[in-house]
Image (spheres, coloured by chain):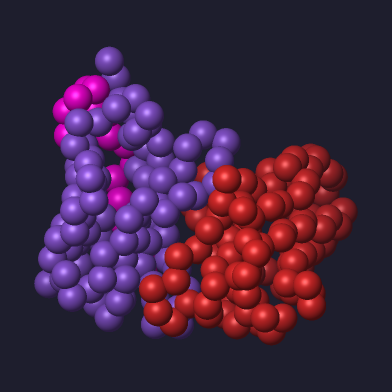
Amino acid sequence: DSGVTQTPKHLITATGQRVTLRCSPRSGDLSVYWYQQSLDQGLQFLIQYYNGEERAKGNILERFSAQQFPDLHSELNLSSLELGDSALYFCASSVGQGETYNEQFFGPGTRLTVL
Amino acid sequence: GEDVEQSLFLSVREGDSSVINCTYTDSSSTYLYWYKQEPGAGLQLLTYIFSNMDMKQDQRLTVLLNKKDKHLSLRIADTQTGDSAIYFCAEILYDYKLSFGAGTTVTVRA
């Protein structure tokens, strides 16, 4: 158990819908990262927040957005869902911002299926 | 190319050594990582190596780094059935993002 929790574990929805994925980082970790894992794209970094502020952005679509709240939990919002958004979405957390050795601890993931 | 590259599959007999290879992209990457993903689980950091090292050993794991060729390898000695998993190589890019390879699926056969 990494200490990172993600809810829900599974999500099945229809195209065009909007969903919210939630992540609670390990106690004491200030950074939260979101990743998408799909068969065709592999593991892709989406976005990072550090202490409430956006820190780094990866291959995140405009239909997706995220935020980190004062209690440091984070939400990833996916809207206008398409079949290709079906994937495993991971959240990870770390103590620092990532500029030095900075182990990221991964949650168990949320499996999103878009029908 | 722009991507971290790994071979996709490796089959190894129980008790033998496994070697997983990776080619990374950024010669200025300060740290390189190996993550393990077991079925239905998230990624777990196995080991890492700092870029000024050539080798790091941690129990059954040996990491070799060739900076000139941007080549990283992970050797697992005495491979066990519990080592069956997907192994990801990752590098830290200039903007502090982790970039992962596609993952090598290791299957341990009896």
Task: State whether residue B65 is above or below residue A41.
Answer: below
**Can the viewer see residue B4?**
no
Position of the C terminus of chain A by quadrant:
top right
Q: Nearer the viewer, residue B71 or B52?
A: B52
**Can the viewer see residue A1?**
yes
A91 on left or right of A67: left
Task: State whether residue A8 is above or below residue A97.
Answer: above
| Image spot of residue A113 (x, y percent) | 73, 42
| Image spot of residue A102 (x, y percent) | 44, 71
Colour of the chain lettered B: purple
Name the quadrant containing residue B59.
top left
Q: Nearer the viewer, residue A23 or B2?
A: A23
Q: Residue furthest right?
A: A17
| Image spot of residue A32 (x, y percent) | 63, 69
Q: Is residue B7 magenta?
A: yes
Question: From which residue to which does the magenta span run?
Answer: B2-17
Q: Residue at x 60, y 70 (%)?
A: A29
A10 on left or right of A89: right
Colour of the chain lettered A: red
| Image spot of residue B5 (x, y percent) | 31, 56
Q: Is residue B83 magenta?
A: no
Q: Residue at x 50, y 55 (%)?
A: A43
Q: Residue at x 56, y 51 (%)?
A: A2
Q: Residue at x 26, y 65 (%)?
A: B49
Q: Nearer the viewer, residue B103 or B79?
A: B79
Task: State whether residue B19 is above or below residue B101.
Answer: above
